[in-house]
Image (cartoon, grey):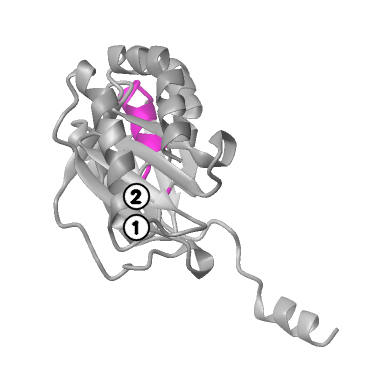
Amino acid sequence: MSDLFQAALQRREALLADLHAEATSCYRLYHGTTEGTPGLTLDRYGDQLLLQSFHTPLSESEADVLFDQAEAFLQPAGVENLQRVYNDRSSSNSRRSDDHVVDRQQLTGQELGVNYLVKGKHKGQDPLLFLDMRAGRRWLQANAAGKSVLNLFSYTCGVGVVAAKAGASRVLNVDFATRSLDVGRENARLNDLDESRIGFFQSDFLPRPSNWQVLKLNSG
């Protein structure tokens, strides 16, 4: 596993130089599903390294080896003293084995110059910023100016925040989870966006079946 991880890091040298140049400190360092260790990922979120195992738990020593390799790889770029977070998510429904643990420290990461709240362990399960949406957020940064943006299933409102930061005339984020919208509000605050430009609305966008529909389904 260590050799596979080292090879993956070396393949990212040019990419990471580009990401750092455009003020991005949130990115994936290892994607085990395509790089030889299915169910294992290691991401950088600002001043934090987040290691997650979805299939097989890692021992503390195994995790430390990967953290050490990542830190050694990032050190030439001036990235040092990163907080280490390991989440074992190999139990049912990919839940953390320590889901009662909450990180009280508030850290900030950047993507394309936009600030985002990052926490390795919080009341939810997933990272507060989904890295696989970067291409979409990049597109919005280039195209959202002057537009009205409706961000459905917004989670922590990364799409809405980058649109507002890019000059959208009005942004509305909709999600069923108040907790996620609260993170979105903090993301807006981190980017000096006030609620005259970006709004937050708690609602389940998918309509619930009426009592008549439920009765009809139950009766066959």
Disc number for residue 62: 2
173 to the left or right of 152: left
> Compared with residue 3, is residue 60 higher up or lower down, i.e. above or below?
below
Q: Position of residue 192 (x, y in %)?
A: 18, 31
Within 10 Å of disc 1 (Cα), the crowding (few <14, some 14-19, many 20+) is: few
Amino acid at the residue labelled 2: Glu
- Please provide the residue range marked out in magenta: 155-168
- Quarter occupied by the C terminus: bottom right
Judge whether residue 78 is colored magenta. no
Q: Which residue is drawn at 66% across and 71% down?
A: 209
Disc number for residue 149: none
Amino acid at the residue labelled 1: Ser
Q: Residue at x 16, y 47 (%)?
A: 106
Q: Name the residue under label 1.
A: 59
Q: Which residue is drawn at 29% across and 56% down?
A: 60
Q: Nearer the viewer, residue 1 or 100?
A: 1
Give residue 75's quadrant in the image: top left
* Circles 1 and 2: CB atoms closer than 8 Å: yes
> Compared with residue 45, is residue 214 higher up or lower down, i.e. above or below?
below
Q: Nearer the viewer, residue 22 or 77?
A: 77
